[in-house]
Image (spheres, rainbow, N blue to C red):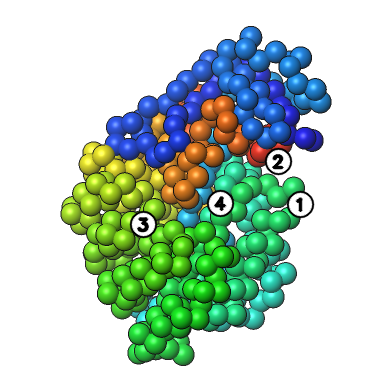
């Protein structure tokens, strides 16, 4: 296949634009009934009424009939920890019995336990394990995924993780785009316990110069007893000076002012935000920081959901992502993310689609390239099983995606 495609007889739903949709704009989707999308070399050439896309206009074209089903932009999962060694089912069991995520981390489990397992994994092992998750994501309609390092926590193992991400990206015929994030500031490793400032120095002086060209984003776990506000500011400022774009895990467990810091340093997104302050919401809305909300994590940790409606009503841009990781949220389920967003966070299905497509793209600085179905954008497209988007949250936690198209090539098809 060559990325030339004509998709016919489609019920198309898409946000429009090349930047994040904010506030009430999030609920506005363009709809085309019985329409076609013409794709050349993996890029959308034309979209609209059937007659504007004659089959004869391209040579070597693959023609598919959507049969009147709903057609959407591919989903963008803009926050995952896709690369990791081992699993942590014991920890999940302890949490079910009432132990908290942070108390497990403070006694040397949690992230540190995945760090130990990741140190023992080769790049090949990390890559083949992650590919299994990528194949599942693609079945659920994901066409772009962000992947973080952060289970190395020393220079060589952080680089090993970023190299694994690069190798995955370069797999011939890879089913999705992979965007890399350096998360060396995910935890203070056990050998630096009580010496946070020294680990911060190591990241700034030794890691940043080596990883800045290997990752698009710098991310940090800004949290009480992990990297608090002053250390986070130092790290984020240094990363920005090294040319990286910024993300934060902010206000996930306690309200620490992570959202305010994200606005202050000009982060592209602040993520989690379960305990964000009113002021944090306002600052993010003012500065255009995308609020990336991760309802699967709140669900798995039995925490309250992030205040999606407050963000939207304040004029902020909300993105949704899975946070797939082996600890706080061992799930990459897009269907369950959609259900939780609509049922518990009170987002409409139109807002939810915008959050998982164009706003997810904006959270990765890619809204001019992907995230909506418009001429000039990459042809990352999904066909649902049903004609209407209302089926997405209604079929709770179930996969409604029938076909996934990445760069104009069918990468998954259930027919
Ligand atoms: O986004 N809280 C920090 N990082 C991840 C969890 C990582 C882990 O537990 O392995 C999160 O929730
Ligand atoms: Fe995370």
- State which tag comes first along the sequence, 4 or 3: 4
Instruction: Say which of marks 2 and 1 sits in front.
Output: 1
Instruction: Say which of marks 1 and 3 sits in front.
Output: 3
Inter-mark Cα distance, 2 to 1 = 12 Å
Q: Name the mark on residue 172.
A: 1
Q: Residues within 10 Å of mark 1 (few under 14, many from 20)?
A: few
Residue that appears at 41% across and 67% down: 241
Q: Nearer the viewer, residue 134 or 295?
A: 134
Picture quadrant of residue 97: bottom left
Give the residue at mark 2.
411
- State yes or no: discs 2 and 1 in contact (Cβ < 8 Å): no
Give the residue at mark 4.
145
Residue 168 image offset from top left, x and y in percent: 68, 59
Q: State the SS at label 1.
A: loop
- State which tag comes first along the sequence, 1 or 3: 1
Inter-mark Cα distance, 1 to 3 = 32 Å
How many labels were placed on the picture? 4
- State which tag comes first along the sequence, 4 or 2: 4
Q: How crowded is mark 2: few (under 14 residues within 10 Å), some or many (20 or more)?
A: some
Q: Name the mark on residue 267.
A: 3
Picture quadrant of residue 94: bottom left
- State which tag comes first along the sequence, 2 or 1: 1
- State yes or no: discs 1 and 3 in contact (Cβ < 8 Å): no
Q: State the SS at label 2.
A: strand
For this orientation, the residue located farthest to the right is: 60
Is any part of residue 241 visible from this angle?
yes
Residue 11 image offset from top left, x and y in percent: 55, 20
């Amino acid at each position: 296949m060559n990325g030339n495609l004509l998709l016919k007889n489609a019920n198309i739903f898409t946000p429009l634009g090349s930047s994040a949709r904010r506030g009430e704009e999030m609920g506005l989707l363009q709809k085309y009934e019985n329409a076609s999308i013409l794709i050349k070399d993996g890029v959308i050439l034309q979209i609209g009424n059937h007659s504007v896309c004659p089959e004869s206009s391209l040579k070597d074209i693959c023609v598919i009939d959507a049969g009147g089903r709903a057609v959407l932009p591919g989903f963008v999962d803009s926050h995952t920890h896709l690369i990791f060694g081992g699993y942590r089912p014991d920890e999940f069991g302890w949490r079910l019995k009432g132990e908290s995520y942070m108390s497990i981390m403070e006694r040397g489990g949690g992230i540190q336990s995945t760090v130990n397992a990741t140190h023992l994994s080769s790049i090949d092992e990390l890559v083949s394990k992650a590919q299994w998750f990528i194949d599942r994501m693609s079945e659920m309609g994901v066409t772009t995924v962000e992947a973080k390092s952060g289970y190395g926590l020393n220079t060589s193992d952080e680089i090993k993780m970023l190299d694994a991400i690069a190798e995955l990206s370069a797999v011939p015929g890879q089913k999705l785009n992979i965007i890399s994030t350096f998360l060396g500031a995910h935890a203070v490793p056990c050998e630096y316990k009580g010496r946070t400032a020294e680990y911060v120095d190591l990241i700034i002086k030794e890691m940043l110069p080596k990883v800045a060209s290997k990752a698009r984003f710098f991310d940090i776990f800004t949290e009480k007893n992990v990297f608090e506000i002053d250390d986070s500011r130092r790290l984020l400022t240094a990363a920005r000076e090294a040319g990286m774009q910024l993300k934060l895990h902010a206000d996930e467990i306690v309200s620490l002012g992570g959202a305010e810091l994200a606005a202050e340093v000009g982060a592209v997104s602040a993520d989690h935000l379960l305990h964000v302050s009113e002021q944090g919401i306002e600052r993010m809305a003012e500065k255009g920081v995308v609020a990336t909300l991760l309802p699967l994590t709140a669900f798995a940790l039995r925490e309250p959901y992030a205040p999606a409606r407050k963000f939207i009503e304040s004029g902020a841009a909300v993105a949704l992502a899975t946070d797939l990781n082996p600890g706080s949220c061992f799930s990459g389920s897009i269907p369950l993310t959609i259900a939780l967003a609509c049922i518990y966070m009170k987002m409409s299905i139109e807002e939810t689609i915008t959050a998982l497509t164009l706003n997810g793209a904006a959270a990765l600085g890619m809204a001019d390239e992907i995230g909506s179905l418009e001429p000039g954008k990459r042809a990352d497209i999904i066909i649902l099983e049903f004609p209407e988007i209302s089926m997405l949250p209604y079929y709770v936690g179930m996969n409604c995606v029938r076909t996934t198209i990445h760069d104009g090539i069918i990468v998954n098809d259930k027919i």
